[in-house]
Amino acid sequence: MKTETKQDPVIVAELVTRLSGDFGERAVTTHAVREHHSHGEGLADAALPDVVVFPHSNEEVASIVRLCHLARVPVIAFGVGTSLEGHVAALYGGVCVDLSQMNRVLEVNAEDLDCRVQAGVTREQLNAELKGTGLFFPIDPGANATIGGMAATRASGTNAVRYGTMRENVLGLTVVTADGRIVKTGGRARKSSAGYDLTRLFVGAEGTLGVITEIQLRLYGVPEAIQSAVCQFPDLASAVNTVIIAMQTGISVARIELLDEVQMEASIRYSKLEGFAVKPTLFFEFHGSQAGVREQSAAMQAASDEFGGSAYQWATKTEDRTRLWKARHDAYYAALAFKPGMTSFATDACVPISRLADCILETKADVEKSGLTAPILGHVGDGNFHLVVLFDGADPAQRESAEALAKGVSMRAISMGGTCTGEHGIGWHKLDVLAQEHGEAVDLMRMIKRALDPRDIMNPGKTVPL
Amino acid sequence: MSDLLGVWRERVRAAAAGNEPLRIVGGRSKDFYGQQLVGSIFSTSAYSGIQDYDPTELVITARCGTPLEKIEHALAERGQMLAFEPPHFGADATLGGCIAAGLSGPRRPHGGAVRDHMLGVRILDGRGDELSFGGRVMKNVAGFDVSRLIAGSLGTLGIILDASLKCMPLPRAETTLAFELAVDDALRRINEWSALPLPLSASCWFRDRLYVRLSGAASAVSAAQHHLGGEETENAPTFWRAIREQQHAFFQVACSAPLWRLSVRSTAPYADLGSEQMIEWGGALRWICAAPDDSAKRLRSWAKEYGGHATLFRSADKSAGAFHALSPPLLALHQRLKAALDPAGIFNRHRMYTEF
């Protein structure tokens, strides 16, 4: 970790004093709170901010950023700390802006199918508040992340096949720019606003171009009918080939998730799933009209049958469905519990759908060679899958082979015309592979960074470091 | 082709060095769109051809000068389409122009916009450097989303060399229903229907008739048709093409006056803005013909009130501004981005705003 460009401690101390004066108890410098804000999930690589501030409004965020701009001190936006690639580590110290107290749903426009929320609203909170409106917000990363964090990392989840990712579902933003100005991008009109599509630029910029404080989101009508199904396969190739056929023939599926046999064993144990074998498994969900889901699900069953899928089980009852998808969402925790005491991180390759089988099977062979335990799970309908690499963090040799395994997955995805990250982002863990993937284009991204954050104070050292 | 790009690189570098503005053109089908046409013509039409299309991937990669018609034909042959249903506005429309203009057709509210289908793009920036962003995968969060920024940037940030677009299977079944409805009822109904799990793929209201297109699996389309009622329309593909290409009577007859495009939230109530309107996109897009002098302010403030903006889409006189003015902080961000990608400001100068 680089520390040589940290701001002069005297200047930082003055800034902390000023923030304490302005924010009172909402500017916290205790070690415990700074430590809590020094890392996300994923690998522990804590780097402490000098102070954590809890603003309540856009204007308060702007006032913090203006002070940081003048003092040239880093600003790191923080939601609930569930990012996976070191996005929130305060590599150069600075001010952590914890947006969790900006957690109001500002408006729900049921007729327009949209809403506006503050950045600290979590996805579960939003859906709880939408209950009774007949609407829901479909993007569901594993964690109960904040909408601000999800916008900043361009998150997706199991529903992306049908509903897209944050990229497609953010209609507009309020952003505090690097010089502390409040700007609104996009709007309530479906079509993007006049001018450049700045919304899309801030979405996924990982807090390196500005602090997202409000988000206008697209909502969807709760489907008339939802049907889930599960199908188990004799081998991984059959499961993946079923997915490929389904996508290529345009079967309209809302979710299509793969769990390999290792992950199934972990999930059966952790989520107490009954009636499943330890075999590669696909979870499906269909959304639509009664007639539509019946037709699509039958088409999927036919596709599964072709590849030897057995025990195609329907789950139409809400409680069965909930249990199934809870197990899928808990898969990461199930993997961790599978080997207690182990350290872990997740890979995030995404490849063109036709290369998915090759990529997963070659990766599986790598896992076997490495001797490590690394369950495979993924949103395979998008060509995206994860390895949860489990290793003994105290054993340097294991750590090295875990990192080599992860790097191998990224490089394979890139060589197959894919990406090292389909949804977790770059943070600072994947800076080297970003350069491999994009080459000289990273230089242009750097120019954009410099244009929007000339003093390099917005989450410095991440995504596209100067 | 690589020789051609070599020539282009030199041309761009020389133009940047000499502060010579370049006006990037493909098929010149959208010359009418935007603020001003400035600079020496830089034609992209020679850089043409589909580079990669494997239907099983649901992705097509093609060069900027490829005729849009050729791309759509290649897709249709394999049962696929561009789900944003782009308007051509001329037989020579190219892929580059389609992306740069960022205009989508009737399917847009249901199938997504141009930018939503941009998986990757390669551009020649204002320094004459070739840069690739994104790729051919459905999800990619590696770095800034420059591909989306390029869509709709009217060629002001770089020359689009080639792009990878997501394609979608053609719907198995499609039908268009017509309903006799006054405008208020039509807006209410179409907004209600939009919230239901119906396979809607387009809507258009004009002179007390609401047209609704349904696309998808046969059973879903017939179930929706049964649910909605209405009267099945003949020659529906021709009808929607005429809407998309602005060959419909509304655009032909009424539009000797300038044409405005109002992008608002779909539930914005109908307002008498002085002349006849056509309403698309479930209420989110309103076309109106009105003289610019007295109408610009009125239309823009009405659109703003309803969460959107008004574009002077076709007009000989653009003095009212083709696009809604940007707030000073937003304008500053635009100028900084423009300077980052095109430091000498040579590409399509003033095409979007006169400030850059």
Image (spheres, coloured by chain):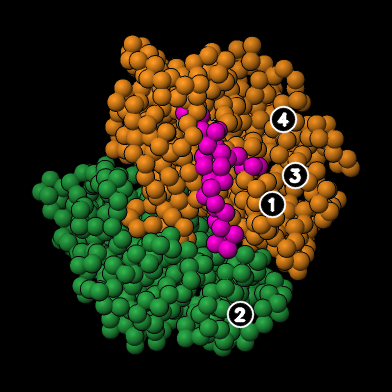
Marked residue nearer the N-terminal end (3 or 1): 1
Mark 3 sits on what residue? A325
Q: CA distance from mark 2 to mark 1?
A: 33 Å
Q: Is residue B246 left or right of residue A303?
A: left
The green one among the chains is B
Relative side of A15 to A304, left or right: left
Q: For chain A, what colour was chosen?
A: orange
Label 4 vs label 1, nearer the camera: 1
- Assign a secondary structure to mark 2: strand
| Residue holding disc 1 | A131
Q: Identity of the amino acid at label 1?
A: Lys
Q: Is residue A344 one of those drawn in magenta?
A: no
Q: Are marks 2 and 1 on the same chain?
A: no
Q: Which residue occupies 32% across, 23% down?
A: A72
Residue B317 placement, left or right of A414: left
Disc 2: which residue: B175
- Mark 4 highlights which residue? A333
Distance, label 2 to label 4, CA atoms, is 47 Å
What is the chain letter for disc 1?
Answer: A
Distance from the alpha carbon under mark 4 to that under mark 3? 14 Å
| First to last magenta residue range | A97-125
Nearer to me, A7 or B41: A7
Between discs 4 and 3, the one toward the N terminus = 3
Query: From the image, which quarter does the N terminus of chain B lie in?
Result: bottom left
**Label 4 secondary element:** helix
Of the numbered discs 4 and 1, the one sitting upstream in the chain is 1
Label 3: element kind: helix
Q: Position of residue A334 (x, y in %)?
A: 75, 31
The three-letter code of the residue at mark 4 reads Tyr
